[in-house]
Image (tube, helix red, strand yellow):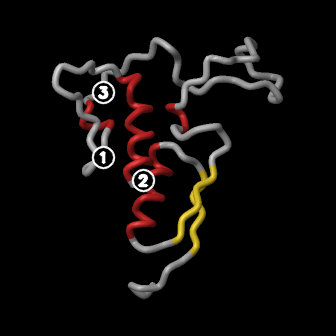
Amino acid sequence: MEKNQSKHVCVVGAGPSGLVAARELKREGHNVVVFEQNHDVGGQWLYNPNVENEDPLGRDNTLEVHSSVYASLRLFTPREVMGYTDFPFVVKEGGDRDTRSYWSLLKALVANH
């Protein structure tokens, strides 16, 4: 592709990977549209406490179920792995290292790019 040739690009999913893909495509000069089925960004990191289905087998696929994130989730993953090279998941001085604030990082990534 020529360096100055801009394309119209669709990114499906506004989770961590989709957001970074959209950001990098935009940096390269493309016109980017992101489609997300949920009400907000976050993908699997978008917590939803409203679960209609208590069936662990999920036999009724018309009901809303939550993502793999739950209210008391704690990860034993280094924060360096959770961030991006130019947008790290860094705790502010005296701040909490609670991984539940990762969704806030994704929101800030969208707001700043």
In the image, what residue type sits under mark 1? Tyr
Residue 8, by quadrant, is bottom right
N-term-proximal mark, 1 vs 3: 3
Q: Report the Cα–Cα distance between label 2 and label 3.
A: 20 Å
Q: Report the Cα–Cα distance between label 1 and label 3.
A: 14 Å
Left or right: where does residue 112 sit relative to residue 69? left
Question: Could you tell me which residue is drawn at 36 percent across and 21 percent down?
Answer: 75
N-term-proximal mark, 2 vs 3: 2
- Residue 83: image location, x then y, percent: 31, 40
| Residue with the mark numbered 2 | 20
- Residue 106: image location, x then y, percent: 42, 40
Any mark on residue 84, and which?
Answer: 1
Asked if the residue under mark 2 is in contact with the one under mark 1, i.e. CB atoms within 8 Å, the reply is yes
- Residue 67: image location, x then y, percent: 59, 27
N-term-proximal mark, 1 vs 2: 2
Q: Quadrant of the C terminus?
A: bottom left
Question: Could you tell me which residue is drawn at 41 percent across and 22 percent down?
Answer: 100
- Residue 79: image location, x then y, percent: 26, 31
Q: Badge 1: few (under 14), some or many (20 or more) residues near its Cα, within 10 Å?
A: few
Q: Badge 2: few (under 14), some or many (20 or more) residues near its Cα, within 10 Å?
A: some
**Secondary structure state at the residue bearing disc 3:** loop
* Numbered disc in front, either 2 or 3: 2
Question: Could you tell me which residue is drawn at 80 percent across and 29 percent down?
Answer: 61
Left or right: where does residue 75 sit relative to residue 51? left
Asked if the residue under mark 3 is in contact with the one under mark 2, i.e. CB atoms within 8 Å, the reply is no
Q: How many marks?
A: 3
